[in-house]
Amino acid sequence: MTRAVIKIGLLLILAYASLLCPHVLAGPFKATAVAERTDPFVGEPFVFQIQVEGSESPDQPDLSHVTDFIVEFKGGRQNSSRSVTIVNGRMMQDVREGYFFAYQLTPKREGRLIIPSINVTAEGRTTITNPVIINAQKAVESDDFKLTLKLSKDQCYVGEPVILTVTWYIGKDVNGFNFTLPLLNNKDLDFINPAFDTQSGKKLYRIPLGDGEVIGEKGRARVGQKEFATITFEKILIPKKSGEISIEPATVSCSALYGYERRRNMFDDDFFSDFFNDDFFGRARRGVYRTVVVSSNTLILNVSDLPLDGRPDNFAGHIGQYQITATATPTDVNVGDPITLTITLSGSDYLDSVKLPLLDQQPGLAKDFKIPNEMATGEVKGNTKVFTQTIRALRADVKEIPPIELSYFDIKSKSYGIARSEPIPLTVKETRMITAKDAEGRVQDVAQGSEIETWGQGIAFNYEDMGVIENQPLGPVSWFKSRWWATMVLFLPVLYILLLTIAVTIRRRNADPLKVRARKAYRSLTGSLKNAGRSSSPTESCNIILDAFRTYLGDRLFMNKGAVTFNDVKDKLLSEGVTQQALERLKTIFESCEAGRYAGGAGIQDAESMVEEGNKLAQELEDSLK
């Protein structure tokens, strides 16, 4: 009887809630492709969107099969709407979930081009977009504008830097422009922007190009009988493989001034027309602009493999003439103590992409020293690149850090050479192992065995008489007399609306997984630091602290947390308002934890202090990054 009554009550509650709860209407999952324009010039970029309905977090589509266009992803964002209507007491919620992806497409050739259907997926569902037809027009020929490409050399070796110079000749006033350089999509090349002296007094411009920007220099030049203003910028090309590299034409599109037209006046009377057409102050004219797309010449770069004759076994692809120096501190250490080895490279014009040779492949270094697997990225300082690495002597008979070698190929002499640093004398002493007795002093013997006492009084039971059972009849009348029942009837709609609001808020907050990780980063960091404080060994504490800060900085700065080093994040942290003092403390934590990790805990005296410092620094970083 009682169970039946309870079931009836639950059914009544569900029926009542269904009358008040809104019915959700959600649209189907589909995607539509839309082009800003369908008749662009060759080399003229236009906006292309994929508009998704039925999902707020679709996967980014793959456009690798769109081969007739240069494709540049410009981002995406949610495009959702929600509305609630009440008809005859029934609440209806209309949910339109949406998202759109934005791209910049640039036609590579003239003619009828097709943007094919594109697959879009979200939460296991898949749909395709409609194809879009683009009629690309030939670039306009104009004597007022020219665009040229020039290479510093048309033959080079793999890894040899080549300068590409782009010059735009401008013969008319322009209002906005956009460069397109298809070469930037070539996976067989690395690209570097040359350094600029901003104090030279020259007129410089930041020019968007691809996913980044270049620095253009304004000048003047004469071509034939015509004077032009010019904008020139450079890109450093570094070939990664041999063969013939075809450099397709670059384009620049602009809005050029081709004349003026008089503004229409508001009077039809001839007297007023003549009067206002006099244009006393030059305000009756407005410029007439026309879109112009200028194409450049094509180039061929022939890339040769480096010769095999005379190539050293440890050659790592360095091109040019190099010098190498090394310093170390401290030089009077115990076995396992950290030694900071600083290696400085110079001689090459472009050091940004230069990497340090693997230290574990250096003759004599790997057998006498413990070398970490993670290599320093290096920092360019003027005409040098400085690498800092921590090493540790393995034995007391180690007397020096041997010369560090760097093999290179000299382009001028077309031969291989080896640059060597000077050996660094060391004094290494034995390290005595500290036992538990040394640390705790006298250890007393503990008596073996223990007595087990039996609680002989047994288990005491509590007894009640039958007077506690009273006749309590249940029925519909008693339900409605109950305050508890009335409260539940009113509470359910309020609870539903509250839960719906919370669910919508959580969904919006979790729509961007990168932002979700960023919000949780600080809590994860403090939790890891607590674990580090409870760790049983200094080495494990160092590992936990170092990994925790790397994960935190990777999530907070939207970087790959597995490759985060102090040098990777310091500039970004400075730009976010982190103080120089906090950066120095962060650097100390990185260096101390790396020292503890690679020396089995040697040199780490107080892990608790490091955890405490980590918590203070974590709070300061979080306050700056909010």
Image (cartoon, rainbow, N blue to C red):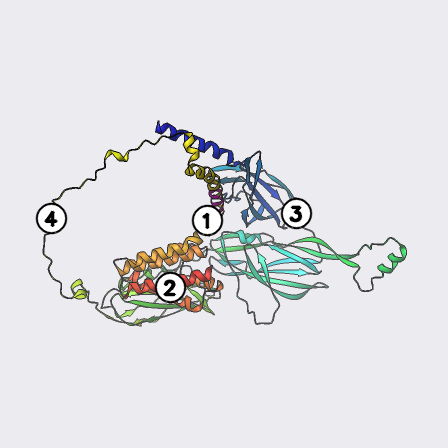
Helix, strand or loop at label 4? It is loop
Quadrant of the rendered image containing residue 257 = bottom right
Q: Residues within 10 Å of mark 2 (few under 14, many from 20)?
A: few
In the rendered structure, which disc, 1 or 4, sits on the residue that comes first in sequence? 4
Disc 3 on helix, strand or loop?
loop
Cβ–Cβ under 8 Å for marks 2 and 1 = no
In the image, 174 versus 561, the foreground residue is: 561
In this rendering, the label closer to the viewer, 2 or 4: 4
Q: Dot 2 lies on which element?
A: helix
Q: Residues within 10 Å of mark 3 (few under 14, many from 20)?
A: many
Q: Farthest residue in the front direction?
A: 467
Of the image marks 2 and 1, the number of the one nearer the N terminus: 1
The residue carrying mark 1 is 513
The amino acid pointed to by label 3 is Pro
Q: Nearer the viewer, mark 2 or mark 1?
A: 2
Query: Dots 1 and 4: beta carbons under 8 Å?
Result: no
Residue 274: give x, y in percent of width and height.
88, 58
Q: Are discs 2 and 4 less than 8 Å apart at CB?
A: no
Identify the mark nearer the N-term, 3 or 1: 3
The residue labelled by disc 2 is: 616
The span from disc 2 to disc 3 (Cα, nearest Å) is 56 Å
Q: In the image, what residue type sits under mark 2? A: Lys
Magenta segment, which residues? 498-506
| Residue 546 magenta-highlighted | no
Dot 1 alpha-carbon crowd within 10 angstroms: few under 14, some 14 to 19, many 20 or more? few
> With 7 as the anchor, is 531 left or right in this view?
left
- Magenta stretch, overall SS: helix
272 to 31, vertically: above or below: below
Quarter placement of the N terminus: top left
